[in-house]
Image (cartoon, grey):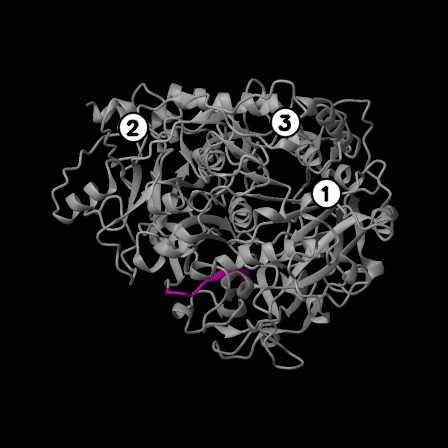
Amino acid sequence: MDLLRHSQLFSLASIVICLPAAVVNAAWSSRQFAFLHRSHHRLPDFVNFHCDDVHRRCISTASHHFSSRNADQYDNVPRPPTAFRNESSFVLAGDIGNKIPPRQSPSSPHALLSPPRCIPDPYAWIRDESRADTEVLSHLHAENEYTRRMTRHLDSLREELYREFLYGMEETDHMAPVAEGHYWYYSRYEEGVGYPIYCRAPRKSHDFYPPAGLRRDPSLPMLSLLPGEEVYLNVPEIAQNKTYLAVGTIAVSTNQEYVAYTLDEMGGETCHFYVRHISSGEEWVLYDDDQGSHKKLLEGYGAVVWDEESMGIFYVTMDETHRPHRVYYRRLFRLDGSYVERTERQHDELLLEEEDKRFNVHIEKTFDGEYLLISCISSEASEVHYLALRPRNVTHRPIDTDLACIARRRNKVLYRVAHCKGYWLVLTNQGGSPNLSLKACPVGNDFDGENWNDVVLQSTGNAVFDGGPHRSLDGITVFDPSSDNSGGVSSPYAFGVATGREDGLPRVWILEFHKDEQVLRSSSDSSPLVATKFTRLEFAETAFNVGIGANRDPTLPYVVVDYDSLVTPLSNIAVPLSNPSDLDARRLLKEKEVPGYEKELYACERTTVRSRDGKTDIPISVVFRRDVLHHHAGNSSGIPIHLYGYGSYGSSIEASFRATRLPLLNRGVVFAIAHVRGGGEIGRPWYEDAKYLCKMKSFNDFVDVARWLTGDNVETSESSLGKDSAYDADWYGITTAAKLSCEGRSAGGLLIGAAINQAPHLFRAAILGVPFVDVLCTMIDATLPLTIAEWEEWGNPNEEHYFQYIKSYSPINNVRHGQIYPACLLTGGLYDPRVQYWEPAKFAAQLRHCVSKDSGNVLLMVDMDAGHSVGNDRYKHLRELSFDYAFLLDELGLV
């Protein structure tokens, strides 16, 4: 038996075995297993025992039962490529006696499962980390072909939707120009071109705002937007002959002569590094090794930061599990500006290496350019190092000796910082606050957090952000208007633009700090930093999305904020920092044009649904055509509703405008967003309340919203209805299961997978985009990207403490046999490092194997040239969206 030939499909972190479970457990208890170690890149340790040749991987064409509701549409219904099930294959969770790869974090207080537990994994053969196994690739191609055949009757609808998407966008368009130094920076699109072109144009010294009324003639391709336009990165040219391209970072050097940029050219989120001289167009490719004849491209995480002299860059590399872990400095140019050739040994200096695999490393400059920040971040702790960038002598001692740490990591203490006039503004949950508070300390006088004091409002002496439950803080950006950018009058104030949430909505606040040291604080270093004013930006709509926009110059007298709502297209608004409450003083820089859009035809509402715990109100946002709701008042057939959700990592799904929703709304579909626990819509406690052993609250919330919309076994009462909308009472029971669809992507795909397992009867159709559905097997396997870091998110199923709980909701392990399931469309990307392609492929196979013959069709589409997303090609994105929407409309009976 050739064990090594087949073991290349698997990783020993999870140990796939093909022996009866009783035999394995007996052998394990006597410690008599002999493990074979293979050498395969990034998968050091998986053993796959094949008992006999019957368990050969294969692709069969066995019959599959199709939904009777769809079968009559076809004369010859195709059969799906049924994946072979190896019923003897399973994964071991727990203590397997090996330390590499790790089975738990060294700091974990919980015991490993001992003896280990067997988890059935009958489709383990679909996992191929090389992406080269011909049988696996053939299976994926067969899945794609089956999906195309099953949806070919929708070809004309897809093309119609695609044309509607194009009609609703300005194909020739540009972003609002943003000031930095002597230039206006912006990107623009040409009709028919999928990728943006990055440009800049000269800016006069006292031009605070970009010219008004900018509009390009779409009939004239490549027409400059501003006089003297210079293209500094032409992505369409770079993308030629590439099947996938995503730009990681574009960083213009401090002297504005060079641009460094990174490209992901496979979809695996590993970037290559390039540097370009803007005026001459001369370009250099960065290589990993600096000697020998073989040239290996430098690979790493996408971030790049220039040094102050524009002579070199800071960058981040990743370890074997795709974790950003090392920060380097590379000198690229000599003092005379000439490039240091590879043959002259470009020198890489290691600044920091993060060895704790729970932590990722990120780099950025402070907004004023004074410091490089290196942040080591896990889900539950952080540590920030800094390096002064100016002034700096390039010949002095090694850079790493200048690194200083603001505060060493402490368990359950998160913090991040911004620089303000010699102070660190510290956003932190130190002290156990529910949300992040805002504190400050002098730079260089950090004392590991002991010297952090609240930033207080001068008029009251109270903390402006105390970390309480009602106001959350996400970030702060500091502006210091100069006389050059303030009409020749130097401002006595610096300003902090804070972003966060209040009343369940995103918010922006302006803090004013006096530059006078005696006003800024009292004479003692331990005294708090004082804000002379604290203003929340207000807007006319009651529900909206707002955040800090594109800002590059901290010396300007205004901040650009981005504003939209479910019915209002995106606007870029310049808000004066000295008088942010004056609505007349705000300047509209650009409003997204949506051809043919008539805002008065649409409406949006925000209401709440009482969860099954009887005390938690789940916010939902809905957008719809007014005439659809009006028509519903006269009949009881139910309105088609598409319910979207995410609910993980504290990320919020905002109530923002999407022109691509209009084809759904115009066909009578109501688009609803369930802001379930696990997201950040109501601050960090909303997130913390649905992780670890509380994760099922996310899934329960989503199902509770679906039940409320369908009137499925929900007790109606005044307390279960929202109180601020004229339509609230009408939303209860407004649809039926036959007209309710659902969707989620990535961790949102986990949400949908768990929801349809819990209540398959509630939904007609489900879209699971790159779904995280094989939670148990993935979180056991420490060789996979994200696993170790996310033990602090989901828990570690190798441990007794978490195993049974994760097993109880992992979608692939909980498909209900013989139940009628909704039609499902699953998507994946072959090179996806976040959710590996085999997760949706295995889940599709498991659904077909288990569910009732009366269930909807299970369709799988794997993009063989992409990763977690389609990259930066906007037209490819619209093609994929038209595919999803056509499936959805077909299932809802709206074709």
Near-viewer residue (745 or 426)? 745
Answer with the quarter of the image where residue 842 lies.
Answer: top left
Q: Nearer the viewer, mark 3 or mark 2?
A: 3
**Marks 1 and 2, the one that precedes in the sequence:** 2
- Count of marks, rendered view: 3
Q: Is residue 863 visible?
A: yes
* Residue type marked 1: Arg
* Residue type marked 3: Ala
Q: Which residue is mark 3?
A: 71
Task: Pinpoint residue 226: horizontal percent, then vertical percent.
Answer: 76, 34
Near-viewer residue (430 or 505)? 505
Q: Which residue is mark 2?
A: 8
* Residue type marked 2: Gln
**Marks 3 and 2, the one that precedes in the sequence:** 2
Which quadrant, please, contains the C terminus?
top right
User: Is residue 61 left or right of 548 when viewed as pictured?
Assistant: left
Q: Which residues are magenta?
A: 410-420
User: Is residue 40 left or right of 738 when viewed as pictured?
Assistant: left
Name above or below for residue 136 compared with residue 462.
above
Q: Is residue 567 visible?
A: no
Task: Pinpoint residue 753: horizontal percent, then vertical percent.
Answer: 52, 45
Q: Secondary structure at mark 3?
A: helix
Q: Secondary structure at mark 1?
A: loop
